[in-house]
Amino acid sequence: MYRGREGQWAFVLHRLSGVAIALYLLLHVVDISLVMYGPDGPFDRFLAFYHKWPFRIGLILVMAGVAYHALNGLRIIVMDFSSWGVRYQRILWYLVLSLTTLIGIPVLFKVVPEILAGS
Amino acid sequence: MAVRARTLEQARELYRTNWELVWWVFMRVSGLALIFLVFGHLFFNNIQVNAGDIDYDYVASRFSRSWVKVYDSFLLGLAMLHGVNGLRYSVEDYIKRPARRFWAKVGLFTAASVIFVLGVMTLWAFTYEEMGEAIRALPGG
């Protein structure tokens, strides 16, 4: 563990979310590419499998990762290109966490009832 | 891996061929663009609609629109470059043996290239509205 303060946790979460999103992206391009087989191909059957609740919860986690990665990416850009970003990096990180939560709550209100209704 | 420059000439040479700097800048520029592209993508396909309702007809009708093809092409290209370069950073950081690191990168870039081509084919190689009709018109279709 290196120092273990906010800056390190910001990095750990950024890397974890980044790797998760990248792997999801590769999988997502492959599964959507199944539409090339046409309407009678395996696409709908495959998607019905993806629509089961464990995958829908996984999708919520990917979206949370996207929100965090995007906002913390902005924090990194501010730290790299402004004169004051590094000085306020800790406050900026708490701002990133707050905004991630703030975006996440309405998404949960939209998506969770859909998952409960569908399963 | 950074090579330490011992003379001014070596430092200039390093600067001229500093691909890591190019990628460093790319990660920030593409990251900024991806915030808008990805948030838009999630809004269209996971907030405006119920992701659990998405089926062939939904995806095919999306891919038959020109603006979706263009939008998704930018999303695919930038996200693949940004994501695969991010995965490369992780390979460089955590795989310590040079030979293993090399083959991990070969595997990563090969898989990513194949998947990228698959994505481009999905977006541009089919006219989904015609394909759907044609396949449905087949005997037994």
Image: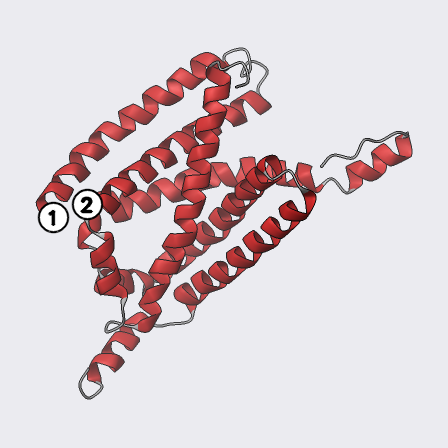
Residue toward you, A94 or A43: A43
Is residue B56 something one can see in this rendering? no
Q: Secondary structure at mark 1?
A: helix
Residue extending furthest toward the left: A117
Mark 2 or 1: the one toward you: 2
Q: Measured along the vertical axis of the image, is residue B77 above or below residue B30?
A: below
- Residue drawn 39% across the image and 30% down it: A68
When asked about the image quadrant of residue B40, the answer is: top left
Residue A41 lies, in percent from the top left, at 27, 72
- Chain under numbered label 2: A
Residue toward you, B70 or B4: B4
Residue toward you, B29 or A100: A100
Q: Secondary structure at mark 2?
A: helix
- Residue drawn 28% across the image and 61% down it: B59
Circle 2 sits on which residue? A53
Residue B56 lies, in percent from the top left, at 24, 64
Circle 1 sits on which residue? A118
Query: CA separation, marks 2 and 1?
Result: 8 Å
Residue B71 lies, in percent from the top left, at 40, 53
Q: Measured along the vertical axis of the image, is residue A15 above or below residue A22?
A: above
Label 2 vs 1, first from the N-terminus:
2
